[in-house]
Amino acid sequence: MRVTVIGAGVAGLTCALELAERGASVEVIDRGDRLGGDCCSWYAGGMLAPWCERESAEPLVTSLGQEALHYWAAHMPGVTQRGSLVVAQARDGPDLARFARRTERFAWVDGEQIAELEPDLAGRFGRALFFSEEAHLDPRATLKAMADKLAERGVAIRLGTDVSAHPPSGDRILDCRGLAARDQLTDLRGVKGEMLLIRTREVALSRPVRMLHPRIPLYIVPRGDGLFMVGATMIESDERRRITARSMLELLGAAYALHPAFGEAEIVEIGCDARPAFPDNLPRIRRRGRTVYVNGLFRHGFLLAPALARMAADTVLVDAYHPEVMDEDHAQRRNA
């Protein structure tokens, strides 16, 4: 079977790799002129944190997201499995307790244990939650590694190709365009996310650290060589290119509250994009004719992509029905 995958973000590349590994002839097309240049995967945190996300997400995100821990470790280099740490200022202790009540698979750690896990945070927090099974990766390095792995399998990635001008020719089409697919998926909405990349040699972290905040989930993810990703806002907006002053202040303030040395960090990059989400913030696989749509990964792209790729490949190759992510009308059409 010849399959054309539209979109070279993490969803598209993961689906392409899954299909190629199952023997399909695959090509990937993307309207961006560089890998990751037109998708929110480029600005992702890269946290593989199914139990941290359980605090605010539906159980489906956690159950599907657990596949990502094994998938990325087996398929891509550079996955770091040192867990996640969730901290809060002393005045926000009740928020930390509420976070704990909403999730699982963690341990309470005290100030001494925090210092053992992250020496540069010694004396700064009295209690924290440690999710030892979670992991993280560098999204940009992972996209490049996926493209290389696809090339090894003979899968071409055609960048700078707009589907409206170059209609795909495969037997099946897998549409992973994210928010751009609203021309067909009218219930998609955009949720704006803003992030920063900062660099400092004064602080070292070995795992993602989440800092509880009354308005938005803030986190700092080490990328190596003194580089840190600080994210991320969630704003109901389709605007993709402009960070607000308020968001900049909140992101920098969170980093400074975690450790004052971040106040002297260099701002390397400011990033902004809109995540594709359905009304319930859960992913969907939809089939219409020869096209299968994979969308709505919201803020869980790298976490959900492996499970969605597996189910999408089932749908494309054997017309499988996965009720947890597929609409009922697909089952009705299939049975008819």
Image (cartoon, rainbow, N blue to C red):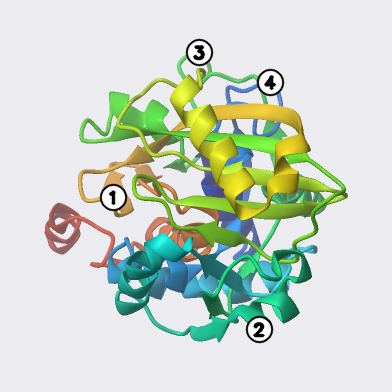
Cα–Cα span, label 1 and label 4: 29 Å
Question: Is residue 117 or residue 153 the one in the foreground?
Answer: 117
Considering only vertical position in the picture, is 160 above or below 200?
above
The residue that disc 4 covers is 33
Q: Is label 1 or label 2 in front?
A: 2
Residue with the mark numbered 1: 281
Q: Position of residue 30 (x, y in %)?
A: 59, 28
Q: Nearer the viewer, mark 4 or mark 2?
A: 2
Q: Which residue is mark 3?
A: 165
User: Which amino acid, by three-letter code, is at mark 1?
Assistant: Asn
**What residue lies at 55% left-to-right and 75% top-to-bottom?**
126
Q: Residue 52 sits in which quadrant?
A: bottom left
Pointer 2: residues within 10 angstroms few (<14), some, or many (20+)? some
Residue at label 2?
A: 113
- Label 3: few (<14), some (14–19) or many (≥20) C-alpha neighbours in 10 Å: few
The mark closer to the camera, 3 or 4, is: 4
Q: Nearer the viewer, residue 79 or 23?
A: 79
Q: Judge whether 199 appears above or below 224 on screen.
A: above
